[in-house]
Image (cartoon, helix red, strand yellow):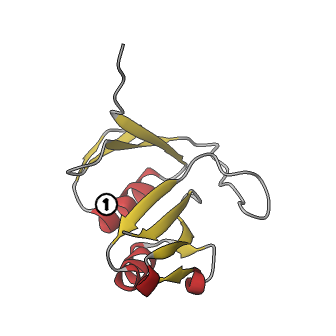
Amino acid sequence: MTFSLTSLIVNAADLESESSFWHRLLGGSITRTATHHFLQIDGFPVIVIQHAPGHVPPQWPNGASQQMHFDLATDDVGPADKRVLDAGGRRLRPTDDVVASAQQGFRVYASPAGHPFCLRSA
């Protein structure tokens, strides 16, 4: 028996805000229904933003635990940081967590719905 990852489901009270954030950050295309937005990006499983009216954002790292997170690798953390912020994300950790020349470390952010994710040096 084998398995493959076909999609990642992200809950959000505001479908448009959350799906637009991931679309601005990662590109691809969005297919919208009343309850789900399907983000299709080359090289990724489908990212599905699922309408969850009662969704309460995690308060990680200083409160309720995170529910999931993405780790994204990039070859240039500085411009990627700006892209995250311009797309509507926010930093959860300071920017000096990454030593770009050493290709180590990571930066921690949250999406508009509060889901944590990391940028790492590729």
The quarter of the displayed image where residue 31 is located: top left
Is 102 left or right of 23, judged from the image as shown? right
Judged left or right of residue 67, residue 89 is left
Residue 112, visible in the rendered structure:
no
Q: Residue furthest front?
A: 102
Residue at 55% from the left image edge and 49% from the top image edge: 13
Q: Residues within 10 Å of mark 1 (few under 14, many from 20)?
A: some
Vertical placement of residue 110 versus 82, above or below: above
Q: Residue at x 49, y 41 (%)?
A: 51
In the displayed orientation, state which residue is furthest to the right: 63
Q: Residue furthest top?
A: 1
Q: Is the residue 18 above or below the residue 67 in the image?
A: below
100 relative to 45, above or below: below
* Nearer to me, 41 or 119: 119
Q: Position of residue 35 (x, y in %)?
A: 41, 37
Residue 105 image offset from top left, x and y in percent:
53, 73
The quadrant of the rendering that contains the C terminus is: bottom left
Relative to residue 32, is residue 121 drawn left or right? right
The x and y percentages for residue 56 are 67, 50
The residue singled out by tag 1 in the image is 23
| Depth check, front residue: 97 or 57 | 97
Q: Secondary structure at mark 1?
A: helix
Residue at (36%, 13%) from the top-left corner? 1
Q: Nearer the viewer, residue 4 or 23?
A: 4
